[in-house]
Structures are given as C-alpha cells and as structure tokens.
Amino acid sequence: MPREKILFAGGGTTKSWKVLLALRILALIATLAAAIVMGLNKETKTLVVATIGTVPIKATLTAKFQDTPAFVFFVIANAMVSFHNLLMIGLQIFSRKLECKGFRLLSVAILDMLNAALVSAAANGAVFIAEIGQNGNKHAKWNKVCDRFSIYCDHGRGALIAAFSGVILMLLVSAVSISRLSIYSNKPSTSTAAAVASP
Amino acid sequence: MAKLTKRIGALVLRLAAFGAALAALIVMVTSRERASFFAVSLEAKYTDMAAFKYFVIANAVVSVYSFLVLFLPKESLLWKFVVVLDLVMTMLLTSSISAALAVAQVGKKGNANAGWLPICGQVPKFCDQVTGALIAGFVALVLYVLLLLYSLHSVVDPFLLQKS
C-alpha cells in the first residue's frame, strides 16, 4: 500500500515546488550574469611604461579574463551551473504529469549538491585572485592591477557579487531538494503521512 | 549485520576525512622557508597569502566538525541536520582548495600579463609543502563527497534507491 502512495503526480503545485522553482530561476539569473559579465571582461589601455630622456614610451596593454586560469574556471563553472539550473527548471515544469519515481528525485538532489560545490569553488578561487589584483602582495612582490585597469576590476567585482549570490542560492536550492527528497520518501518516522495525503 | 558494517564504514570514512583535513591544516601551517640571496633575505610563510590563511581556517572548521560528528549517537534527530552541514563543509572544502590552488598556480607559473613573477624558484621547499597540503585537502574533499552521499542515504529511505 505505501508504494502506491509514492507514485502520485510529481509535485504538482505544492509549496516546496513553487519555492524550488523560484530559487532555481534566481540561481540561473545570478550564475548566468556572473558568467556573461566575466566572459566579456576586457579592457585595453595605453600606458606609459618607460621614459627615455623626455620621450615617454607608450605600450598598449590589454587586461582580459583569459590571462588568469582562475577566471577561466570561473566562467566555465558558472556557465555549467546555469545550464544545470536551466535543465532542472525545464524538468520541473514539463514533468508535472510524470510519476515522482524515487530515482529522479535522488539524482536531482545529488546533482544540485555537486553543482553547489562547483559554483562555490569557482567564486572563491576568483575572489582571492581578484583580491591580489586589488591590493597587491608585497611579500611576493606582485603589484596591483586595479589602479590602472579600473573598468576591468569593476566588471570583475560585479561578476563576483553575482557569483556569490549564486552560491547562496545554490545552497538553498540543494537544501530544498534534499527536503523534498525526504518529504516524498517512505520513512514512517517523518511527517510523510500528512505530506503524502495532500500533494 | 549489514547495517553495522555500513555504520562502521561511515565512521571509518569520517575518521579518514578528519585525518586528511587535519593533515592539510598542519602541513600548510608548518610550511615556512627562508631564502636569502645577495643581501636580501625573504621569508615565505603561509600567512603571506590570504588564500592560504583561508585554506587553514576552512580545514580547521572541517576538522572540528568531523571530530564532533564522530561522536553523534546513531538515533539522534540531528542526522537530518548533518546532511545539510555536510554539504556546507563540502562547499567550504572545495572553495578553500580552489582558492589555494589558484594562488599557488600564480606562484608557480606567474602571470606575465599582470607582471607577477613566479616565486617557486626562490622558495622551492615552501612550494612543495603547499602542494602537499593541497593534495591532503583534495583527499579530504573526495572523502567528504562520499560522506555526503552516505548521509543522504541514511536520512532518506533505501526504498527510494531502487527503481520501482
């Protein structure tokens, strides 16, 4: 008897379904914004590098995100996480009629957790490199970049803020996925009786 | 009987994760090298880089958490909490490894476009110890991912793992 109770329509319009959808849309927007803003981050400037006598020697320097492997990983990881969110949103909307089989919910929960870890790695790796670029590091004698390429740093800052909100949102999405997993499970000790009766 | 072996397996896994995080912490903290050439002497220690300090703090938090969860009784209601906290610890571990790796990569190869010179040529022992700490941190991360899957499994009924 309990087995049939599990196989009802997949969620429908329960509160957790709505909350999960809203969180996923926000996470999609945040990670996509982070990937796009960092992906288009480029600044070219003509700087004076040396002075010979009274003649200044100018060189055109470009700051682009491909110079730093941490930023490349940042763009790729945020693109992957936003693609995952897009896929999950599509799955949630278009499979309302499908049966809520256990394996599907479990794989969604596991994928959400892995993607939350991925986006947190990407955001954090980039923020520490950006901190060196902003403040320099006098122990290693690495000088600041942000005083000369201020637009590059501003865009980077925006992308990092978007990525960190994506991290918090992905953590919430994973938490809600895990709670949905335990609501629709068969454990009699949890409050499944009430949840199963009214999907 | 199978439940007991599973529980012992999970305990061993958590002990191993605790050991790995502690090892990463200790190796990073004790990495220090003094190099001198001409009249200049420079000392490289882990507090020079903010990313390494964050690595130490994150691994300390993970070690303390693992140690505390080792003593959690089996029937406690806190196991549901442990799933989410395991996820948070995994995110902490991945972020700390990513940050330390990013900075160590710049230290090893430098960044020609930003004018940052590599420092590993001058302090090779420091670089080696940082690499060792990163490897230990990576082992801790892999163990934590396995632990996360196990905690999820122990909170959710095993019925869900079979296809119906």
Image (spheres, coloured by chain):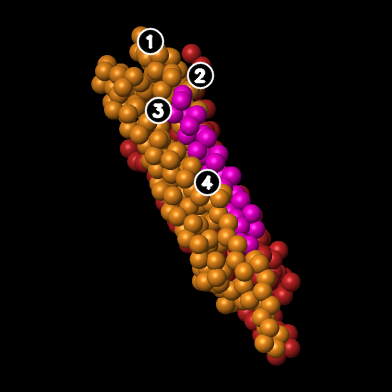
According to the picture, the residue beneath numbered tag 1 turns out to be: A4
Q: Separation of disc 2 and disc 1 at Cα?
A: 14 Å
According to the picture, the residue beneath numbered tag 4 turns out to be: A35
In which chain is the residue bearing label 3?
A
According to the picture, the residue beneath numbered tag 2 turns out to be: B162
Amino acid at dot 1? Glu
Circle 2 Cα neighbour tier, 10 Å, few/some/many (<14 / 14–19 / ≥20)? few
| Whether residue A181 is situated above or below residue A35 in the rendered picture | above
Magenta part of the chain: A62-91
**In the picture, which quadrant includes the N terminus of chain A?**
top left
Residue at 51% of width from left, 19% of height from top?
A: B162
According to the picture, the residue beneath numbered tag 3 turns out to be: A181
The one of B19 and B40 positioned closer to us in this rendering = B40
Q: Position of residue A144 (x, y in %)?
A: 56, 72
The one of A2 and A72 positioned closer to us in this rendering = A72
Q: Main secondary structure of the magenta part?
A: helix
Badge 2 element:
loop
Q: Is residue B71 shown to the viewer in this render?
A: no
Cβ atoms at labels 1 and 3 below 8 Å apart? no
Q: Nearer the viewer, mark 2 or mark 4?
A: 4
Residue at 42% of width from left, 24% of height from top?
A: A92
Badge 4 element:
helix
Badge 3 element:
helix
Badge 1 element:
helix
In which chain is the residue bearing label 4?
A
Amino acid at dot 4? Ala
Q: Nearer the viewer, mark 2 or mark 3?
A: 3
